[in-house]
Image (cartoon, grey):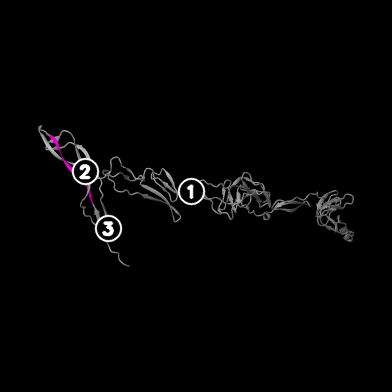
Amino acid sequence: MPCGPSVEPTCNNGYNTAYQTVASSNNTKEGCFCPHGTTLFNTVHDICVDTCACVGPDGKPKQLGETWTSDCQTCVCDKDSMSVQCEPVQCQSVQSPNCSEPGQQLVNNTVNCCTTQSCECNVNLCPPPPTCLLGFQLSITNGTCCLSYNCVPKGVCVYNMTEYKPGTKIPTPDTLSEPPLEAPEAQSIVEQASVTTTTPSGAGEISTTSESFTPGPCQECYCGPEMDPVTKLNIVICKPVVCNENCSAGYEYQTEPGKCCGTCVQMDCIFTTPDNVTVHVIEVNSSYIPPNDKCVQYTCEKLNGQLVTKETKATCPPFNPLDCEPGTETTDASGCCPTCNISLCKTQKEQRILELNNCKSAQPVNITYCAGHCDSFSMYSMEANTMVHNCECCQEATTSVEQVELTCADGSKLQHSYTMVQSCQCSKTECVEGTTPKPQRRRRR
């Protein structure tokens, strides 16, 4: 082990001064010492240096001209003064960024003693999704930091807090609060933009784009295909209602107070023939008789405010064609019941071959007889309090006897007498007794 001074000189002048007395005593000690021509840098670090220059912040020696950065300062071991010279670190001037995107915030970043600023995303600062108005729907896209929300138009009309697709009819009031006036110019009131615009109506059309739009009862409105550039809602198109005043037969068009259009009110009876082919209009208190059926009559009556068609069928009296004068058969004035000129009791004539016991006349013989109408009746008599009958019969009044020659099968001849009616008359006869119910006494109350 080599020997050296008890206090070895260092590059620390303060240390050397403090121990100068001890160092000059020429006392020695055994240990490790710096080689000849070098100096111990300090007592902390066992470093031997050729030259005592600068001490860095870490307490270690720095070479002349060596630079380093410490505490945001740029330092150099100056060759001339053999001392440390420091200056603040020079930072480049940088403009602060504009953090305008939703959710962004300005953050300071220090690197190499220089501070820079940047925009960083903080999702806690992101705005909540908005609530879109009627007629709009939420559109979501990815933004720089947050989700981007946008209310985009649906392409619909909005009326009375209800959305209507293009082409859909918009309901209008059923009644008028007052009589309808002439159609005014169309007004378009835009609520969302607080703008009022007036558009002249064209060809009777009324257009509006606002939720405050109120259609009248004399309008037909539907959602149009075009969008208003201000409200971004589709335009409501309205046209005046065209009332159908064409009524069917038997009906009359009548206006109704408080309503835009009237209705067809039935004024006459409507009769359809049984074959469901022909329709006839019958006025009130008038009648219709089908041409092919004179025995039925249809009468229009108004009962309790209702129109009723009443059917009446005619009842014809008994008719016997044998009682008619030949060629006089016809119908009565109504065209329903058959009638004729009654043949009165008189002499009738016809020709016939007389036959008797296989003998007959060679030629037809004129035969006369009585036929025709006589007065006969049956009616109630108040005096007799019973039915009174009167029966008359058409019979001969005067007769004569005539002769006719009959030829028999064996060729023999036979004279035959027969009765010839010369005149006829109505003679009373006995009536057949009928059944007449006894009159009933009315019970007193």
Relative to 116, 415 lies left or right: left
Q: Amino acid at mark 2?
A: Ser
Circle 3 packing at 10 Å, graded few (<14), some (14-19), many (20+), is few
Which type of secondary structure does the marked residue at label 3 adopt? Answer: strand
Q: Name the kind of residue labelled 1 in the image.
A: Tyr
**Magenta stretch contains residue 404:** yes
Residue marked by disc 3: 381
Residue at the (84%, 58%) spot, across then down? 29
Q: Which residues are magenta?
A: 391-406
Q: Is residue 354 in view from this perspective?
A: yes
- Residue 326 is drawn in which quadrant? top left
The amino acid pointed to by label 3 is Ser
Residue under label 2: 423
Sequence-earlier tag: 1 or 3: 1
Give the image location of residue 177, x and y in percent: 58, 55
Is the magenta region chiefly helix, strand or loop?
A: strand
From the top left corner, tell me how far across and down residue 339 is, in percent. 31, 45
Disc 2 versus disc 1: distance between alpha carbons? 68 Å
